Amino acid sequence: MKEAELELAAKLAIRSRCELRPLHSTAGYAELRENFAIGLPVKGRDSLEVIRNLVEAATPGLSGSTDPGFLAWVIGGSSPTGVAADWLASAWGQNAGMFLTAPAAAVAEEVAGEWLVDLMQLPHGSSVGFSTGATMAAFSCLASARLGVLARKGVDLEECGLAGAPPVAIYIAEDAHVSNYSVLRYLGFGNRQIRRIPSLEQGTFDLAALEAAMAEDGDAPRIVIAQAGHIMSGAFDDFTEIARLCREHDTWLHVDGAFGLWCRASPRLRHLAKGVDLADSWSVDGHKWLQVPYDSGFAIVKDRTVHRAAMRMTAGYIEREAANEPDPSDYVPELSRRARGFAAWAMLQHLGRRGLAEMIERHCRAAHSIAAALAKVDGIEMRNDVVLNQIALGFEPLPGMDAPEAVANRLNATGRYFLRTANWRGEKVLRISVISDRVDEQLGARLAHDLASVWRELRASLSETNETRFRFARHMADTPLS
Ligand SMILES: *Cc1c(COP(=O)(O)O)cnc(C)c1O
C-alpha cells in the first residue's frame, strides 16, 4: 500500500511531463477555486483517491513553464534529472538542517557548493548556503554583509542590534531587481540608508554617480549591491571598477547574479562578468540556468566565518558531534528544510562543465539570433543591447492599439509561446528570456519568424482600417449635410 501512492504519483507525474500540455493554464481563478475548495473532510480519505483528485484539480491550472516556448520570465525548465533527484529528496524525507539529522544531504550540499564556487571561478573556500531562491540567497549574503561591515568598525551587531549601531549606507542601482529592495527591508534598512544610484541605459550603475555618493558618506560602514545580469537587459556592472571603489571605502560588495552569474561557467561568456570574483558575496539561482526544479538558490560568501556568524543557530539540543561535519543550516535562515543539495548535485553531474557551458552558450546564441532577425523588421526596435539571454523589444506605436500587448496576445493564442510584456524605462516592451533548457536556435528562428509575421499583419490590418476610415471620411465630406 505504501508503494501504491508513490507509484501512482510517479505514473501521473511522468504522464504530465511527457504528454503535450497546454502552455497556458486553461482554467481561471473561479474554476480552480471550485476544483480545490471541496471542503475539509472530517474523516480522512483514501490516499490514492486524494492523489488522483489532486491531479485532476491542478491540471487545468498548470502553466507550461517546463516547455521551451515559455519565454516570459527568467524561469528555468526544471530538468527531468533534477526532478528525479528531487523526488528522491522528498521520498527520503531528510531534514537537511544539520549533519546529525541528514548526513548525506549535508555532504551533497557541501560538495555541490564546492563545485559551484569552482565553476564560477569565485574565491576558493567561499561558503555556500542552499536557499529557496535568489531572494533568500541575497538575504543570507546581505545579513552577512551587515554583520561584516559593522564588525570592521568594531561594532558587535549581536550585542547592540541595528538600533544601537552606526547607520550603514547601502548603494544600489535604482533599476536593480526589486527583490533586493525587499531583502533590505527584511534586514531593517529603510529609505534613509538606501542610496538609490541612477542607472545607465541598460540598468547598470552610473559609476560617476556611485563614486560621488560614496564620497559623501564619510567613514560610514557601507554595502554596495551590484548586478550580474540585469533583469530586463541582461547587462553586467563593471565589477573591476566597483571593486576598486569598494576597496577604497572599505565596503562590502554583494552581487545579485540570479541568472547572469552563470555566464562564469562558460569560457566564451565569462568575460561579461569580469572582476566579479573581487566581490564579497554573490546570490545565484539554481532554478534558473542550472534547470534545478523549484526551489533552489545559492548564497555564496567569501568569508565563511562571517557567513556562519550571521546565520548560525546554536542551542543546547543542537550540539554538534565533530568540528568537520557540515551543518547546512549554518548558511541560511531556516533550520528544518528540504534537502536541496541532492537536485543541485545531480544537475551538476548530469550537465558537467561542458554541458552547462554549451547550454548557456546555446541560449545566448538563440537570443542573439532572435534579436538580429527582429532588428531588421520595420517598426521593431531593440530596447536593450543583447549581451546575454534577455531581449526587450520596443514597437513603433500603432494608433489605438497597445502594440506589445497585441503582439504577445497573438503569439500566445497560437499555443506555441508564453510571452509577457513589461514596463521598462517608461515604455511597454515585449520581454523574451531564453533560459529554458530545451530552447535552441531552431526555436529562436521560429519565434523570430512568427513574431515578425504577427507584427506585419497587425500593422497591415491597421493601415487597412485607416484606409477605410479615410475613404469614409472623404465620402462624408463630399456628401452635402442636408
Ligand atoms: C529571479 C531574480 C531574482 C529573484 O530570485 P528568486 O529565485 O525569484 O527569489 C533576483 N534578481 C534577479 C536579477 C533575478 O533574475
Image (cartoon, helix red, strand yellow):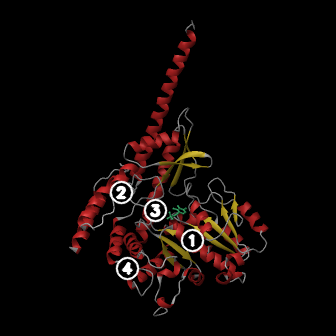
Residue 149 relative to residue 73: left or right: right
Q: Name the residue under label 4.
A: 94
Find residue 11 and report its horizontal and vertical position in percent.
Answer: 24, 64
Residue shown at 40% from the left, 66% from the top: 293
Residue shown at 21% from the left, 70% from the top: 4
Identity of the residue furthest to the bottom in this view: 322
Proximity of marks 3 and 4: CB atoms separated by less than 8 Å? no
Mark 2 or mark 3, which has the lower sequence index?
A: 2
The answer to whether residue 101 is visible is yes
Mark 3 or mark 1, which has the lower sequence index?
A: 1
Q: Mark 3 points at which residue?
A: 360
Of tags 2 and 1, which is closer to the observer? 2
Q: In this view, does 287 lie above or below 382?
A: below
Q: Which mark is residue 37?
A: 2
Q: Distance between the residues labelled 3 and 1?
A: 26 Å
Q: Which mark is residue 131?
A: none
Q: How crowded is mark 2: few (under 14 residues within 10 Å), some or many (20 or more)?
A: few
Residue shown at 69% from the left, 61% from the top: 196
Q: Residues within 10 Å of mark 3 (few under 14, many from 20)?
A: many
Residue 15 relative to residue 342: left or right: left
Q: How far apart are marks 1 and 4 (CA)?
A: 24 Å
Q: Mark 1 points at which residue?
A: 139
Q: Is mark 1 on a helix, strand or loop?
A: helix
